[in-house]
Image: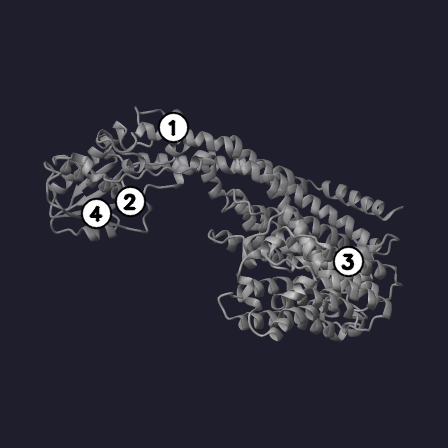
Amino acid sequence: MSRYRRVWVVYRKELVETLRDKRTLAAMVLVPIVLYPVLMIIIVQALRAETGRRQAERYSVCVPDEVHRDWLRGVLRREDAEYESGVRAEKPGPARSPADMSPSEMLRARLRADQVEITVLDPDSSLWDAVRDQRFHVGLIVEPPPNPKRPADRRNRSVQILYSETSPRSEYVFGQLNNILAHEADRIVRARVSRMPDGVATLTPFLTNHLSTSSSEQQFAKILAMVVPFLLVIMTVTGALYPSIDLTAGERERGTLETLAVSPVPVGQIVAGKFGVIVTIAMFSTALNLGSMTAMFHFSRLGELAASFRPVPAGEPAATQAAPDSATQDAGVGLTQRDYLRERMRLEQEAGQKAGFITKAAPIVLLAMLPFAVLAGGVMLATCSFARTFKEAQNYMMPVMMAFMIPAMVVSYMPTTRLEGVLLVIPVANIVILIRELFLGNYQPAAMGICLLSTCFYAAVAVTVAARLYGNESVLFADVGSYKTLFARRYIRPQEAPSPAAALSVVALLFPFYFYWQSYLINFAASPERIRLIVAMGQIFVLALPCLVFAWYLKLNVRETFALRWPAALPALAVLLIAAGIVPVGNLLRAVQFQWFPPGPDMLGEEAGKLIEGSLASVLLALAIAPGICEELVFRGFLLSGLRRRVSAVASVVIVGLIFGLFHLYMEKIPVHSVLGAILALVCLRCGSIIPAMVVHIANNAIPLLATRYEALGSFFALPASADELVTPRLDARGLAFIGVFLVGLVMLCLTRKRRA
């Protein structure tokens, strides 16, 4: 039976057993399908009930005398009259029944005159004490006292509203009165200027209409983008939780884990089958949750609720927000309210035809959640491997759940964060921001690519570590002491090279730190010497030194781990030919890539030119020699030595190349650097030594740097003289000759006898 057949058998067996559990089926299928419609119905009904309660309640206002009472009654009646006439209404026209109203209108309460009971206090009573003791919802004082019979006289007044911020009803009445008084002030101003020669048109020398091009669906997507990514992360993690516990601690508690471990099927294939079940259930749960939410938002009228989340600002009358009034239109300025609303409706229809942001984003979101589900499944499978009972596994899962929830929650409450910088490679946080950007319709291919590639990298590391722990005897058969045997140095047995899990884990730990170093600490406004110093320090202290420390801690054979030996004569000659042609080949690869994917401004900008200013020795040391040594120790040393004994040579070359490309800052650099990284890995494997890879790497960095100082050298290697030639190079005879030299060296290297690395 082939290994794939055995993995399929394990996968099918575990999946069938997991799906037999009714609780798992209910949590995975029933909850997503029923939860969101029921939840949204409950929310809408609760909001409608709250609006109806506010519209039916009576509110009390205390004033110091009858003059204030008569004036306030007149203000409330004028507000009602304006609203009924359509001036203040969301949509002008006659009164409509609730069935004809939009959801946003039905969920927006308005304070009416018949709801307000105005009481005149005794002269000896204090408005402050009356409101503080909650005998009245608000108190109102106008200085100087208003004139109920002449509300639009020439005197300006100060209105003081007393309310209790801890009382919801008092705060509601305060907000409503604040808007009503702002509308009254607008009416007074218009009445005053109507007697002037130009009338009300004097108030509107410039008229600004707030006409948003975003449809209500897009506005609602903005609200969903704050909640849905966090919810999807939690649902994915929850979907992977119980299968992970059942397939590890559950097996151990049932007494079947040890039997499974000693079966003739390799542990890696068992883990692959179990892990496939975890990812399948997690992704199925995520797909159902996403599909249920998408269907509910697409087929319901909930998009219209976006308007109800945009309250009218206090002090800014609704009429001036919507459109100019009739007096302004008569003066020949702006649009009528009917024209405005017609234009708004046209934009809504066009946006609705173009959009469906939620529906369009759903497939990409589902694709982005796949590597995240793999990451969550790997972490949970590795963690649950330590548990001896189902209850113990649940306790272990609490910190794991918090580790996923905290970054997702923090980023969800930071709406101004963007998918850039170090956030591109922070696990969980990058996926949350990516989903939020997709819901908002912001598609950035470069940032999305780095985000997904980094998550795939973390997921591969998690799977490798899970397979390593699941097959570890100290984890399978030992008790709490297994922790010490895994992590305490005195229990670690000396080895020639790291395991794949250890190598990938170390490189994964270095990845976000190096990305942060590159993104935030390198400031092109600084001096060239400072920039080069930071670059060199990053190579030494962020890349090379941690790998050397881990090699010491894990008791590895440094010579074997980093392939520190001299190569044979024939491979060394082939390496010299490869080093001579590596730069023209790299330029050709970039040119081919740029034909399909044009470079961004960061690739061809002038900022990078500051790096090569100053001493030539410091430039070569920081930008050629330090990377050529330090990066080779990490990728062709520590990482390659961990992979080559468990993975085929071809797979090792590809994996090392991809990870090497991922470590570079810009998306445009990843394809070419991945190919160069694979070539360097091939050189190291065929020569059995890391020194030739260092030579090729240093040559690849040093030749272009030297060519900036010596034009003859650039002409000799047929290097592009300008940024335009980098995009569309001219392949002359000399350039083709160097490419031929490179190919001859590569063929010679492949035909030489492979030396053990």
Q: Report which residue position mark 1 lands on.
A: 101
Q: Look at the image and tell me in which quarter the C terminus lies.
A: bottom right
Q: Report which residue position mark 3 lands on.
A: 653
Q: Is residue 114 left or right of residue 665?
A: left
Q: Secondary structure at mark 2?
A: loop
Total number of numbered discs in the rendering: 4
Q: Report which residue position mark 2 lands on.
A: 314
Q: Could you tell me how far apart the alpha carbons at marks 2 and 4 are, in whole angstroms?
A: 18 Å
Give the camera-side residue of 723 and 353: 723
Point out which mark residue 139 bears: 4
Q: Nearer the viewer, mark 2 or mark 1?
A: 2
**Counting other residues with Cα less than 10 Å from the Cα at mark 4, is it few (<14), some (14-19), or many (20 or more)?**
many
Q: Could you tell me how far apart the alpha carbons at marks 2 and 1 are, in whole angstroms?
A: 24 Å
| Residue 241 visible, this angle | no
Instruction: State which tag comes first along the sequence, 2 or 4.
Output: 4
Instruction: State which tag comes first along the sequence, 4 or 3.
Output: 4
